[in-house]
Image (cartoon, rainbow, N blue to C red):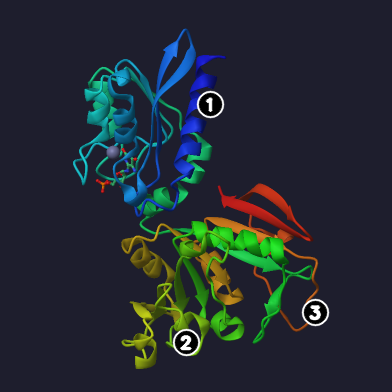
Amino acid sequence: MPDDVLDTKLLEACLRLARRHQGLTAANPSVGTLLVQFDDHVPIIVGRGITAFGGRPHAERVAIDEAGEKARGATAYVTLEPCAHHGATPPCAQALIDAGVARVVTAWTDPDQRVNGKGHAMLLEAGIELSQARMEVVRRDLSAYLTRKSHNRPHVTLKLAVSADGKLGVAGKEVPVTGVLARSVVHRMRAQADAIAVGSGTLAADDPDLTCRLPGLETRSPRRFVLDGQASMAPTSRLARTAMQVPTTLVTAQPVLPEALTELGVTRLAAELHDGRIALPEMLEDMAADGVSSLMVEGGAAVAQSFLASSLVDSLALFTAPTVIGKEGLASPVCLDTVPNEFRLERSLTLGHDQLDLFFKV
Ligand code: AOF
Ligand code: ZN
């Protein structure tokens, strides 16, 4: 196998390791590291590391500790540039240098201002051979972290479930559009997101839970945000009643929340209004500052339209169902044949009678 192909395969193995802790490393990205010795081009893995639960220790430290003396002369494969800063832990670039690693292969640069090329520079200065692969699949996996660090806002996924006649549902009542398989995929997406947002109209019409109810993943429900300029959330709504179990925040221009909501544990995120609507860029900046790296937007039509119109959608999860809703339905801002040009189809899945098309902004 040519060496560059082997490098790619080993970075892909690091990526699979990193996925095990995705969503479990707080505001830190989940990074994967392999320390590899070569016996006549045959790789022998001497150390494995994943960013630990909660974000520390970092992946490189874990791998170096496992390898011990075998790290000397090894090649380190890392999904993200090793850190260069003295934060809660000493710099990983220095740890790799001290461990006597001969070569480092990374898959993406760390945009954290304290790193951003400095980790790579430290390795080169120490005489270590460095290869930077810039793998697209790694960028996808790290997209939440990269978006927050580079743009100061969470990565936004807009989820829409559209009927065969291009409708999202009916105003004021809950109408199931997709089937049970599609719904489990939505729950898995929720488990992978830090937060979920809906408009107050969706809340009033559907009284949703917005939790992950997949067996074994019940504790992975994201934080819930309701875009509710007037703080009109009913204290009897499911979200309000379960706010003590799953953090629930009203994004509102009202200076204080009604006491009934505060008593139930609902919190407030102060919003600015532009033309009577919540200013999304400022809201996203506040969410990012609060550690939200990935946000799933689940409805309704007006909220979806606002995110699209502000160019704040990074990926689009478009579920299409054979259900026909009819004239009284609310038109979806996007259907399969009207996806804006800036989105590229990444993957299509058949889910029973429904279909999921996943798009990423190019
Ligand atoms: C690495 N390896 O496994 C991870 C890194 O608060 P600290 O000190 O833990 O630093 C957080 C930063 O560390 C984070 O913003 C990112 O730049 C880097 N994450 N770096 O070398 C890792 N998770
Ligand atoms: Zn580090």
Q: Which residue is mark 1?
A: 9
Residue 106 seen anywhere in this rendered image of the structure? yes
Q: The N terminus is located in which quarter?
A: top right
Would residue 352 be found to the left or right of residue 238 on screen?
A: right
Residue depth check, mark 3 versus mark 1: number of the one nearer the observer: 1
For badge 1, the amino acid type reads: Lys
Ranked by sequence position, the earlier of labels 2 and 3 is 2
Classify mark 3: helix, strand or loop.
loop
Which residue is depicted at the point 39% across and 87% down?
261
Would residue 119 be found to the left or right of residue 45 on screen?
A: left
Q: Which residue is mark 3?
A: 326
Residue 309 seen anywhere in this rendered image of the structure? no
Q: Position of residue 72 (x, y in %)?
A: 29, 17
Would residue 313 be found to the left or right of residue 150 on screen?
A: right
Which residue is depicted at the point 39% across and 61% down?
292
**Residue 181 falls in image quadrant:** bottom right
* Residue that protrudes farthest toward the bottom in the picture: 259
Classed neighbour count for the residue bearing mark 3: other residues with Cα under 10 Å, few (<14), some (14–19), many (≥20)? some
Vertical comparison of 20 with 119: above or below: below
Residue depth check, mark 2 versus mark 3: number of the one nearer the observer: 2
**Residue 37 falls in image quadrant:** top left
Q: Which residue is mark 2?
A: 233
